[in-house]
Every structure is written in C-alpha cells, then in structure tokens.
C-alpha cells in the first residue's frame, strides 16, 4: 500500500517538474524574441533611465551628471535580420514506474497416498448346482393299490381294561367275516382276531376286537389286515394309536376303535 502511494507521488512530482521546465523555457524564449514584453522584468527601455554611479572617486554614492551620447558614423545592419532560434530544451520523458505485481501464494498440491494393491486370494469357485430333478409322470392307478383301507376312528376311556376293536366291512357298509386283523407292539409279536359276519356290541359298533389287558395299560399299538392267522403279509395300511395307564383327565385312553374297509 505505502509503496504504491510513493510511486504515485514520484510520478506527480516528475510531471510537475517537466511542466515548470517547459514553462520557464517558453518565458525565456519570449523575452529573447521581444525584450519589451511584459514578462521581462528588466526591459531595455528602463535601462536608459537608471542613474550612472560616478567612478571618479568624488564620493561614495555621488551621482555624475548625465552625459549625452552622440552617435558617430552610420550604423551598419545586415541585409536581413533573421532571429536565430534558440534551442529549446526538450524534456526527456522519465521512465514510468511499473507497479510490481503482488506475489500471490499458490497452494501446493498435497499428494494423495496411493493405495498399494494387495494380493487377495480369490475364494474357490462354488461347485456347480446339481441338475434339476427329472420329473417322471406316474399315472394314477385305476384301482386302489391295496385291498383294504384302515382308519383310526376314536379312542375311549375305560378304567377296567385296555384293547382294540372295530369293523371290517365292504364299500356299502355290510360286515365281512373271516378276515384276520393282526395287532402288535414294538417288541411284541401281538395276536390275530378274526372278524364276524354280524356286528355286535353297543349300537353294533364292532365285528372284531382284541383284549390287551384287564387294567389301564400304556403303550403304542399297531393294527393291519393280514393274509391269515399268524401271517405277517399285510393287505392294508398299518394304523397306529396310543393308550395310557390312567383313565381320568386329559390324554386318557384305553380302547382304540379302528375300521377296515374293503376298497373293491
């Protein structure tokens, strides 16, 4: 800021000096060309009127009497008087100070750290998925695959005995006699009961049954239609049900009702 102001002041003073120099030269030139100009403080016309100080030593400050000057001879002039121009000083232009540019700080680029690649082992490719299963069309059978169909009907509570019972009947509901029902348990080979041609019991609810115990007995029992007495060749599906050793409360059951229906 201060340096800029000093440069401007020096330039102004230089221009003022040049202007005054040119003006002074012009004044001198005008006085030389016309001595009687008003700018001349000592014109020739005023010089004749000034008193001449005596030089004869008559006394300091004594004035001599004016002596008339008589011209002698004839003045000689050149054919044509041509004023010789006086060289006028030409101001040499001063070098203009060029303001020095202000240094502007340029931010330095900060190098960005380069990540060094690391050799990461690629995981093994997963095994290809197994081929989709081939679906084979299996036609529905025109008739049941087994001769008999067994179904669990219900369980009953009885505090005096435990067993299985039910019906062996045809598609129309008529009882079929002479059919062997095999019932057993895991670890027990079981027994076989032959169905009768008529229903009996409460409201005709059975034509076969098999006693397991004369008390509440817990166990898991299986039943199916067998090809004959003592046979383990089954003509129906296997029906499984559980009994308990208590005859009161939730989950109590002693008698299992199973129905076998001939499919054709």
Image (cartoon, rainbow, N blue to C red):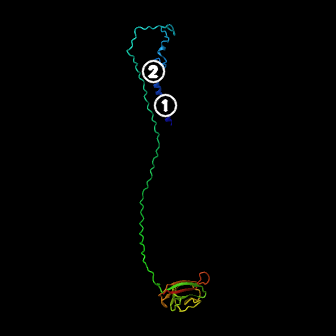
Disc 1 on helix, strand or loop?
helix
Q: For residue 62, which numbered disc appears in the image?
A: none
Where residue 185 sits: x, y (%)?
Answer: 52, 85
Q: How many discs appear?
A: 2
Query: What's the distance in space between the residues labelled 1 and 2, CA to CA?
Result: 27 Å
Position of residue 59 in the picture relative to residue 246 (left or right): left
User: Badge 1, how many Cα within 10 Å: few under 14, some, many 20+?
Assistant: few
**Contact (CB < 8 A) between labels 1 and 2?**
no
If you read the primary sequence from the N terminus, does the residue marked by circle 1 or circle 2 appear first?
1
Image quadrant in which you'd find residue 70: top left
Q: Residue at x 47, y 27 (%)?
A: 19
Where residue 162 sits: x, y (%)?
Answer: 57, 87
| Of labels 1 and 2, the one closer to you | 2
Image quadrant in which you'd find residue 122: bottom left
Q: Residue at x 45, y 23 (%)?
A: 26
Where residue 133 sits: x, y (%)?
Answer: 42, 74
Position of residue 251 in the picture relative to residue 141 (left or right): right
Mark 1 sits on what residue?
12
From this view, report whether residue 116 is shown above or below residue 255.
Answer: above
Q: Residue at x 48, y 14 (%)?
A: 45
Disc 2 on helix, strand or loop?
helix
Position of residue 135 in the picture relative to residue 216 (left or right): left
Mark 2 sits on what residue?
30
From this view, report whether residue 27 is shown above or below residue 190.
Answer: above
């Amino acid at each position: 800021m201060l340096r800029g102001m000093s440069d401007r002041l020096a330039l102004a003073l230089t221009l003022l000096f040049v202007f005054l120099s040119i003006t002074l030269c012009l004044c001198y030139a005008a006085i030389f060309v016309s001595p009687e100009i008003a700018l001349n403080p000592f014109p020739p016309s005023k010089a004749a009127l000034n008193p001449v100080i005596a030089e004869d030593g008559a006394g300091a400050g004594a004035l001599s009497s004016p002596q008339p000057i008589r011209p002698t001879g004839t003045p000689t002039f050149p054919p044509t008087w041509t004023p010789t121009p006086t060289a006028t000083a030409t101001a040499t232009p001063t070098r203009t100070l060029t303001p020095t540019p202000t240094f502007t700080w340029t931010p330095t680029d900060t190098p960005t750290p380069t990540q060094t690649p690391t050799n990461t082992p690629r995981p093994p490719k997963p095994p290809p998925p197994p081929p989709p299963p081939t679906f084979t069309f299996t036609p529905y059978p025109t008739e049941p695959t087994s001769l008999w169909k067994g179904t669990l009907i219900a369980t009953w509570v009885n505090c005096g005995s435990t067993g299985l019972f039910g019906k062996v009947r045809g598609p129309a509901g008529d009882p079929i006699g002479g059919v062997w029902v095999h019932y057993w348990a895991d670890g027990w080979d079981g027994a076989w009961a032959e169905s009768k041609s008529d229903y009996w019991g409460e409201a005709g609810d059975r034509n076969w049954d098999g006693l397991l115990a004369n008390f509440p007995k817990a166990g898991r029992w299986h039943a199916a239609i067998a090809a004959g007495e003592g046979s383990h060749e089954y003509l129906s599906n296997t029906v499984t049900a559980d009994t308990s050793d208590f005859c009161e409360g939730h989950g109590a059951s002693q008698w299992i009702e199973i129905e076998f229906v001939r499919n054709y």
